[in-house]
């Protein structure tokens, strides 16, 4: 099985750097363009046999736009939902930075050790994501190309698992809106391909900690 791991297009909260987590936020206009570009890249470069998606609106709408007209059925998996950010959800990056001790910086540096209050523990996120990937693998044992449209946190947690690195490295992995990451479990093939996106002529794998999940 070849997994095509796509992050949803920009949401209206991504646009204003507001933490969303489990909030069900829709796509921005740019996000819709990114979803369409993702769809073109997937159709031109792969032979997608199935698509599994987070049930959250920003991911489901991305998959719907990307695969419009293909006849491929979208299978929502609750385990692919974005990780909860607890008390930070609905706040902007700037608001969290301004709190005593700048907890945002501590979280960026060590998300496993310094999670948001009430946030979902990263090992729990990994466990549910692995359940989803395991189910997908059982349904596609013969090397199919399978599209998975999910979230930056979810994809980054899975990559930490594949690479065998600490979840404290989570935000050192850049997963942009509308990007494509490819894996043949347990092997990682490529990370954060954005060459297909409008205004992004190159593929980027550099770190950027200035994003609201």
Image (cartoon, grey):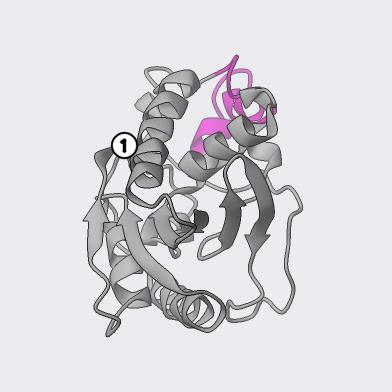
Q: Is residue 37 above or below residue 26?
A: below
Q: Is residue 195 above or below residue 175?
A: below
Q: Judge from the rendering whether residue 110 lies leftward or rightward of residue 52; answer left or right.
A: right
Whether residue 84 is visible, yes or no, is: no
Query: Where in the figure is residue 186, as x and y percent of width and height?
Result: 61, 39
Q: Is residue 146 left or right of residue 55?
A: right
Would you name the residue on which mark 1 appears?
A: 79
- Please rate how many residues cluster around mark 1, counting C-alpha atoms within 10 Å: few if below 14, some from 14 to 19, many from 20: many
Instruction: Pick out the residue farthest to the front.
Output: 142
**With 87 as the anchor, is 160 left or right in this view?**
right
- Residue at image location 36% in from the left, 46% down from the top: 136
Residue 50, quarter of picture: bottom left
- Please tell me which residue is depicted at 56% across the width and 62% down the height of the picture: 180
* Residue at x 39% of width, y 23% of height: 120
Q: Viewer-proximal residue, 127 or 97? A: 127
Residue 107 among magenta residues:
yes
Q: Position of residue 26 (x, y in %)?
A: 29, 61
**Residue 48 visible in the displayed image:** yes
Residue 42, position in %: x, y?
49, 75
The percent coordinates of residue 158 (x first, y second) are: 54, 37
Q: Magenta residues, as a range?
A: 95-114
Name the foreground residue: 84 vs 102.
84
101 relative to 173, above or below: above
Quarter of the image holding residue 132? Answer: top left
Residue at horizontal 33 percent and vertical 39 percent from the top: 135
Residue nearest the viewer, comparing 48 with 41: 48
Mark 1 secondary-structure assignment: helix
Q: Quadrant of residue 71?
A: bottom left
Residue 117 higher or lower than 154, as above or below: above
Q: Is residue 2 magenta?
A: no
């Amino acid at each position: 099985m070849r997994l095509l791991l796509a992050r949803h297009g920009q949401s209206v909260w991504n646009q204003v750097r507001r933490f969303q987590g489990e909030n069900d936020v829709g796509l921005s206009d740019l996000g819709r363009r990114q979803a369409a570009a993702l769809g073109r890249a997937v159709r031109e470069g792969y032979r997608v046999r199935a698509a599994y998606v987070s049930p959250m609106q920003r991911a489901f709408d991305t998959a719907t736009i990307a695969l419009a007209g293909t006849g491929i059925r979208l299978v929502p998996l609750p385990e692919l939902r974005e990780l909860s950010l607890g008390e930070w959800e609905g706040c902007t990056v700037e608001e969290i930075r301004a709190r005593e001790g700048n907890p945002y910086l501590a979280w960026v540096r060590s998300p496993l050790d310094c999670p948001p209050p009430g946030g979902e523990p990263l090992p729990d996120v990994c466990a549910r994501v692995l359940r989803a990937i395991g189910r997908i693998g059982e349904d596609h044992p013969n090397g199919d190309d399978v599209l998975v449209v999910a979230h930056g946190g979810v994809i980054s947690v899975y990559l930490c698992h594949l690479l065998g690195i600490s979840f404290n490295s989570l935000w050192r992995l850049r997963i942009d809106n509308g990007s494509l990451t490819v894996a043949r479990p347990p092997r990682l093939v490529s990370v954060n391909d954005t060459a297909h996106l409008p205004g992004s002529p190159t593929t980027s794998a550099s770190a950027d900690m200035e994003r609201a999940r």
